[in-house]
């Protein structure tokens, strides 16, 4: 394995791009698989978990790795695209060993694993040879000392902890998009998944929950304190929060709604009154809404909000006050492409599309799909009988309901024609 450094730390491999010998990207490394061995033998590195197109995770044996460092990983080009399934004898180095409490043999001191160093032996096998540890701080508020020790200088790597933190795992995964972090969470054990979820901030966990299958959402939410669960739901978009609430027992959902801020709870309650596969059940109550005397510069400032999805940012809804759903009468919509072509100082009322008819909340999923396809839209307004804007349906939510319930798990198999 020429070109590789003598030692690689696994936390630095997270999200490293994997290339074939021609320089084409195969995927990204997401974890390292090790086997904890008995009889005082160092843990053996079996291979890498690599995420390829479609967020499918495959197993890449170390025998297929030509070179490896924190900048890139190069394979032989022979990659088995079968979905990775963890075996009972295998351990995820990042997902299961980071943040584990172990004991220093020499001092009997409890320390935390923050990284693992792996090296290639003379027999060309890769082994865990070093453990990066964090010692407890001697003073409150101070960070403890870090050190790198030989793998056999600690005990407890193979023991399953009752409660295991997630600080250093999350630091490793910090730059991941919510959808990618959701994929990591989905592949962890339920115990580890709950530990990682508990360590995420409310906003980050809300973003990740929106990308998870419903059964994972319910499981994670059920493991949280009810007051924090309510806070998480408040951070979710109203339509995703309503979808999640619909999966909970009615008494649990009702109690969580009482703990939420009145405005957020009101939006979710209103969405829950609509049938699931209708425009009302699909819509979000938080589109970009402006009054007719707003300028185009005002509109462009609103759609620059990084928290908006691309579909929500593609359209501005111009309404009479009040400007929170249900608003005053909808006057028209302004497409972002039109906004970009007009002087910023002009009023938005001069560029709105007043001819596009809005949808009723009772419109079926088929009608919503046909509407978006007919007018080449990625979002559409939903109004009541008085013409007041109730919300907007976006194409991502339509696709979410058109696909099978288990589409996230089946996406990989669909990609390869299984």
Image (cartoon, grey):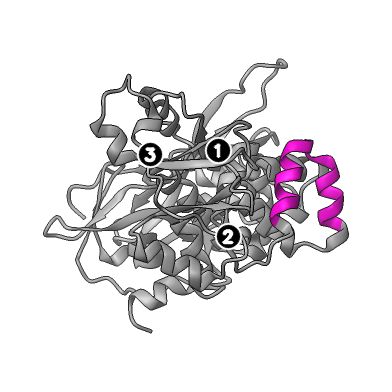
Judge whether residue 392 can be spotted in this image: yes
Q: Nearer the viewer, residue 213 or 306?
A: 306
User: For residue 160, which quarter of the picture?
Assistant: bottom right
Q: Which residue is mark 3?
A: 352
Q: Position of residue 281 (x, y in %)?
A: 63, 61
Q: For label 3, count other residues whose C-alpha is less than 10 Å away and answer few (under 14), some (14-19) or many (20+).
A: many
Q: Is 46 situated left or right of 189 in this image?
A: left
Question: Residue at 40% across / 66% down in the picture?
Answer: 56
Question: Residue at 71% across / 49% down in the picture?
Answer: 268
Residue lying furthest bottom: 418
Q: Which residue is mark 1?
A: 168
Secondary element at tag 3: loop
Q: Are marks 2 and 1 in contact (CB under 8 Å)?
A: no
Measured Cα–Cα span from mark 1 to mark 3: 49 Å
Question: Residue at 32% across / 19% down in the picture?
Answer: 345
Which badge, 3 or 2, comes first in the chain's sequence?
A: 3
Residue lying furthest left: 22
Secondary element at tag 1: helix
Q: Is 248 situated left or right of 197 in this image?
A: right
């Amino acid at each position: 394995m020429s070109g590789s450094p003598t030692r690689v730390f696994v936390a630095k491999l997270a999200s490293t791009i994997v290339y074939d010998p021609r320089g084409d990207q195969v995927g990204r490394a997401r974890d390292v698989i090790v086997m904890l061995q008995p009889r005082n033998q160092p843990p053996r590195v079996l291979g890498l978990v690599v995420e390829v197109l479609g967020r499918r995770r495959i197993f890449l044996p170390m025998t297929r790795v030509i070179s490896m460092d924190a900048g890139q990983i190069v394979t032989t080009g022979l990659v088995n695209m079968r979905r990775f399934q963890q075996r009972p004898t295998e351990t995820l180095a990042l997902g299961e060993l980071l943040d584990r409490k172990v004991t220093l043999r020499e001092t009997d001191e409890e320390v935390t694993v923050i990284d693992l160093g792996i090296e290639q032996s003379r027999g060309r096998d890769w082994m865990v040879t070093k453990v990066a540890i964090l010692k407890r701080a001697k003073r409150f508020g101070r960070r403890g000392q870090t050190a790198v020790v030989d793998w056999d200088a600690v005990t407890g790597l193979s023991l399953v902890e009752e409660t295991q933190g997630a600080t250093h795992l999350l630091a490793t995964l910090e730059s991941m998009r919510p959808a990618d972090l959701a994929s990591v969470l989905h592949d962890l054990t339920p115990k580890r998944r709950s530990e990682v979820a508990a360590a995420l901030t409310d906003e980050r966990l809300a973003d990740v929950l929106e990308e998870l299958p419903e059964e994972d959402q319910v499981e994670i939410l059920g493991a949280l304190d009810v007051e924090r669960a309510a806070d998480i739901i408040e951070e979710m978009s109203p339509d995703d929060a309503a979808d999640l609430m619909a999966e909970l027992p009615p008494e649990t959902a009702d109690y969580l709604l009482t703990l939420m801020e009145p405005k957020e709870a009101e939006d979710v309650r209103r969405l829950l009154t609509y049938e699931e596969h209708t425009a009302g059940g699909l819509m979000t109550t938080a589109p970009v809404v402006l009054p007719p005397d707003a300028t185009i510069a005002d509109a462009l400032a609103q759609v620059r909000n990084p928290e908006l999805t691309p579909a929500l940012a593609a359209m501005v809804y111009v309404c009479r006050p009040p400007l929170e759903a249900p608003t005053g009468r909808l006057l028209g919509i302004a497409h972002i492409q039109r906004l970009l072509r007009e002087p910023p100082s002009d009023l938005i009322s001069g560029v709105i599309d007043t001819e596009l008819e809005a949808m009723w909340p009772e419109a079926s999923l088929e009608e919503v799909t046909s509407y978006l396809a007919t007018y080449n839209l990625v979002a559409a307004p939903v109004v009541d009988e008085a013409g007041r804007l109730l919300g907007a349906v976006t194409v991502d939510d339509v696709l979410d309901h058109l696909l099978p319930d288990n589409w996230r798990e089946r996406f990989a198999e669909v990609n390869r024609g299984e």
